[in-house]
């Protein structure tokens, strides 16, 4: 049976790349491995290396802590947690995700569970997630095929496409524009409020999920595919 | 003189943008709103050490009171923001019309006193922890979670070791959750943190 010990990768700088392969033993290039008593495996970048590459079994929980550098988590992972300050972050597929960064670009492919993203100014893209929780000061937030969402931005634009039978959606912005798209023939319950922004809802009212959007000055639009 | 306690930083999310958009008087009103809510929530054995731009530096003698107060404050901020959502549209009348999103970082440590101020590595670490939090969140160091242990109404979700500016070694960070709240599993408690406790709770 494949080793699914959680992997913690720490490096102040340098790129981090994680790949998954069926039946593989954990292997590391450019880093040192240390097994802790709690069963976690800690990987640190070797002094001579400028990048870490980890190969592990699908479903492995991976935590990455860096200050800068590109982070690519490829393959199908378990619980993913990333904390960094800047640099591009890409997660192809995971059971759940927690990403925290100040700036850069965050690109999430598929998240089977909760996808939580906290950033100051990074551009955010989520391909699909059971539920997305995103907080940003600025930067565009693009969420596609989400089954529910809670978004808070100050000035960033929010574009959100809901999956069929999506759960509650809550979006709060100060000045960012908000566009929510629902699947065709969906009749959501909407609660839309903007103090000075324009509000437009092209969907007939109904009880197909709840969409609440509040902004101070950002325009709000809810439409269907 | 040094003594153990919980160091808490609060920070208003988006303060710079809000100030730029709505002006300095608005910013002052926002700061006052935060401070009134925080001061009214503080237990006896806690104090506001100082104001720091859009945040506050707080000191608690008891880490459990620190965490309880932070979670309670976040609920209070949520209530205020829900009330803002329910208000009428039209012109922005005041700070009550905009959300007050506050994030918080907590570290149990042993700073040095300098008059009423506190300084040292543990204060710097608490300041870095709040940088990682999102609006409405409370994050703490593993050392804080360790010293609190299991506590009714509180859950901890480890976020792993994190590099923060100014510190050479990665610091294990934990997300604090109100039990029964978002993603909190009250059964999970908190794992074995004896290494972190030995490292981070000794006054140096």
Image: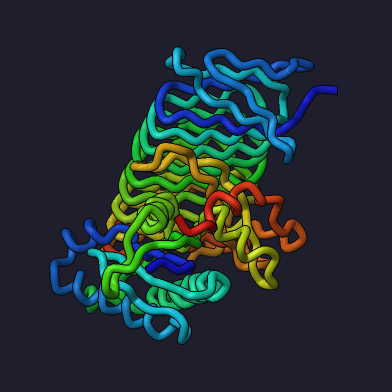
* Whether residue B53 is situated above or below residue A56 in the rendered picture: below
Nearer to us in this view, B96 or A185: B96
* Whether residue A12 is situated above or below residue A48 in the rendered picture: below
Does residue B190 appear to the left or right of B4 in the view shown? right
Q: Name the colouring of the figure.
A: rainbow
Q: Residue at x 29, y 75 (%)?
A: B116
Give the image location of residue A119, x and y in percent. 40, 45
Give the image location of residue B176, x and y in percent. 57, 60
Q: Residue at x 47, y 28 (%)?
A: A11
How many numbered marks are there?
0
Give the image location of residue A180, x and y in percent. 45, 50
* Whether residue A200 is situated above or below residue B95 in the rendered picture: above
Query: Residue B100's quadrant in the figure?
Result: bottom left
Nearer to us in this view, B44 or A212: B44
Q: Residue at x 22, y 74 (%)?
A: B91
Give the image location of residue B16, x and y in percent. 22, 58
Quarter holding the N terminus of chain A is: top right
State whether residue A224 appears in this view. yes
Does residue A133 appear to the left or right of B192 in the view shown? left
Nearer to us in this view, B44 or B202: B202
* Whether residue A135 is situated above or below residue A23 in the rendered picture: below
Does residue A104 appear to the left or right of B95 in the view shown? right
Query: Residue A174's quadrant in the figure?
Result: bottom left
Q: Residue at x 70, y 19 (%)?
A: A26
Q: List the single residue furthest toward the right.
A: A1
Does residue A104 appear to the left or right of A162 in the view shown? left
Q: List the single residue furthest toward the left.
A: B24
State whether residue B89 appears in this view. no
Nearer to us in this view, A56 or B7: B7
């Amino acid at each position: 049976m494949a080793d699914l010990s959680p992997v913690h990768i720490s490096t102040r700088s340098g790129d981090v790349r994680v790949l998954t392969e069926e039946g593989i033993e954990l292997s590391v290039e450019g880093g040192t491995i240390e097994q802790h008593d709690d069963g976690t495996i800690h990987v640190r970048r070797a002094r001579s290396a400028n990048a870490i590459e980890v190969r592990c079994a699908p479903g492995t929980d991976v935590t990455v802590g860096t200050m800068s550098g590109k982070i690519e988590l490829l393959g199908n992972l378990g619980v993913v947690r990333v904390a960094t300050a800047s640099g591009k972050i890409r997660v192809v597929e995971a059971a759940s995700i927690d990403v925290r960064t100040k700036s850069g670009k965050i690109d999430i492919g598929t998240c089977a569970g909760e996808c939580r993203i906290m950033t100051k100014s990074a551009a955010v893209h989520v391909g699909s997630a059971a539920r997305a929780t995103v907080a940003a000061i600025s930067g565009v937030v693009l969420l596609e095929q989400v089954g529910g969402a809670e978004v808070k931005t100050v000035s960033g634009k929010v574009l959100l496409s809901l999956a069929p039978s999506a759960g509650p959606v809550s979006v709060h912005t100060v000045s960012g524009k908000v566009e929510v798209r629902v699947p065709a023939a969906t009749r959501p319950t909407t609660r839309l409020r903007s103090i000075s922004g324009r509000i437009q809802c092209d969907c007939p009212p109904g009880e197909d999920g709840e969409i609440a959007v509040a902004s101070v000055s950002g325009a709000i639009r809810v439409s269907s595919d | 003189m040094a003594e153990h306690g919980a160091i808490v930083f609060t920070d208003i999310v988006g303060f710079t943008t809000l100030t730029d958009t709505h002006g300095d008087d608005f910013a002052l009103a926002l700061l006052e709103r935060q401070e009134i809510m925080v001061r009214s929530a503080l237990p006896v054995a806690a104090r506001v050490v100082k104001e720091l731009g859009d945040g506050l530096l707080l000191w608690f003698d008891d880490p459990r009171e620190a965490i309880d107060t932070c979670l309670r404050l976040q609920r209070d901020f949520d209530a205020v923001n829900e009330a803002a959502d329910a208000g009428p549209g039209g012109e922005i009348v005041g700070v009550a019309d905009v959300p007050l999103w506050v994030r918080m970082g907590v570290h149990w440590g042993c700073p040095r006193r300098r008059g009423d101020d506190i300084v040292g590595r543990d204060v710097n670490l608490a300041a870095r922890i709040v940088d990682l939090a999102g609006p409405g969140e409370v994050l703490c160091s593993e050392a804080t979670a360790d010293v609190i242990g299991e506590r009714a109404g509180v859950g901890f979700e480890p976020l792993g070791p994190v590099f923060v500016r100014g510190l050479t070694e990665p610091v294990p960070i934990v997300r604090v959750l109100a039990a029964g709240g978002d993603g909190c599993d009250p059964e999970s408690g908190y794992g074995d943190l004896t290494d972190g406790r030995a490292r981070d709770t000794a006054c140096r």
